[in-house]
Amino acid sequence: MIPTLLPTYSRAAFSFEKGEGAWLIEADGRRFLDLGAGIAVNALGHAHPALVKALTDQANALWHTSNLYQIPKQQELADKLTEQTFADTVFFTNSGTEACELAVKMARKYWFDKGQPEKTDIIAFSGSFHGRSSAGIAAAGSEKMTKGFGPLLPGFVHLEFGDHDALTAAISETTGAILIEPVQGEGGIRPVPDQCLKGLRDLCDEHDILLILDEVQCGVARTGKLFAHEWSGITPDIMMVAKGIGGGFPIGAVLATEEAASGMTLGTHGSTYGGNPLGCAVGCAVLDYVTAPGFLDAVNRKAGLMRQKLEGLVAAHPEVFESVRGSGLMLGVKCKKTNTDVVNAGYNQLILTVPAADNVIRLLPPLTIEDDEIALAVDRLDAAATALVAA
Ligand SMILES: Cc1ncc(COP(=O)(O)O)c(C=O)c1O
């Protein structure tokens, strides 16, 4: 008989009942150090007082009206985001993959309205992940995500990640946009080098192509800048955001320049829940927190500490680990042992990490993690590696 929960997930046998900062407390009382943060979602850790207050204040006042009316918190969050970024305008969604849907619609509508309706193709890359909606799976294109779900949304061109020659060769008069994660998350924490992002921007400018960045996982201070592309000095035309912006409350967004958004006129898009007062109240609180003076410096300092300790871990266990990679507090350790075995060995040491492609374990701690928690986390990974070798 089919389980009452549709069985699309393989779930570990934990039921967490409470969260405190970087800690998750299991029903049986065990305290796990959480280096997954709900897959880069709990940017300020669990039950951060500023977010609890923002959510409960809003919950006590008003939950939902509709986009038929003004939503002051939505306007406030859009103003904050445009003030802090390249963007002139924002549309709020409930998730990352809905942001992908809109990014694709926006790019296609842009070219349609410009009188170049043939520019429908969107170039995307191997190892990418843009969510599980029809546009998201078609964009990523991997067999794992698309098999059996055809016919797929057409108009995506898939190239090997990092193959510059293939990219130049693939550009044609039907290319409307390039879609890329500045740091691939599910793909195994693979950062796009700064010079490659610059090259992509140049290529887009030269050939009249929109650049769409998916910062759903790498955005919102995760890499030590508010958005990961800032390290390279370039700006996109359209950007997808989700995860960290809600700190655990479901909210996403598409940010765009006025030009790129110019096709999205009255009635061309909508969402019942997108930008609802609860999500936007929390989003405002998260954004205020991560843009406060000193926050990004602290993320960068902690990222340096964590990376240094992880390098030591890899050196101490060459039979388990191969290398460390990533950006800021979006770190990956490539494993020699099977990554899911490493994650499971971590569970036994009360530490949570997340597997990714390319035999990597992902470390995406709350950005508020303390130095002693970083040290403890690496000690627990060390114990996990020792146990794995002994087994
Ligand atoms: C880069 C990226 N894009 C899109 C998504 C999809 O987001 P959601 O699961 O909120 O739909 C994810 C989720 O992991 C992601 O990492």
Image: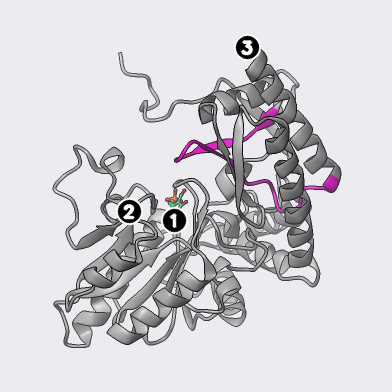
Q: Which residue is mark 2?
A: 136
Residue 119 vertical placement versus 208 (above, below): above
Q: Which residue is mark 3?
A: 391
The verdict on residue 177 being magenta is no
Residue 326 vertical placement versus 120 (above, below): above
Mark 2 CB in 8 Å range of ligand 1? yes
Between 285 and 306, the one lying in front of the other is: 306
Quadrant showing the C terminus: top right
Answer left or right for 48 relative to 65: right
Provide the secondary structure element on which disc 1 rests.
helix
Amino acid type, label 1: Gly
Q: Quadrant of residue 295?
A: bottom right
Which of discs 3 and 2 lies nearer the camera? The answer is 3
Disc nearer the start of the sequence (3/2): 2
The answer to whether mark 1 and mark 3 are in CB contact below 8 A is no
The answer to whether mark 1 and mark 2 are in CB contact below 8 A is yes
Residue 254 vertical placement versus 355 (above, below): below
Structural distance between the alpha carbons of marks 3 and 2: 40 Å
Q: Which residue is mark 1?
A: 96
The verdict on residue 370 being magenta is yes
Disc 3: CA contacts within 10 A as few (<14), some (14-19) or many (>=20): few
Mark 1 CB in 8 Å range of ligand 1? yes
Magenta-tinted stretch: 351-371
Provide the secondary structure element on which disc 2 rests.
helix
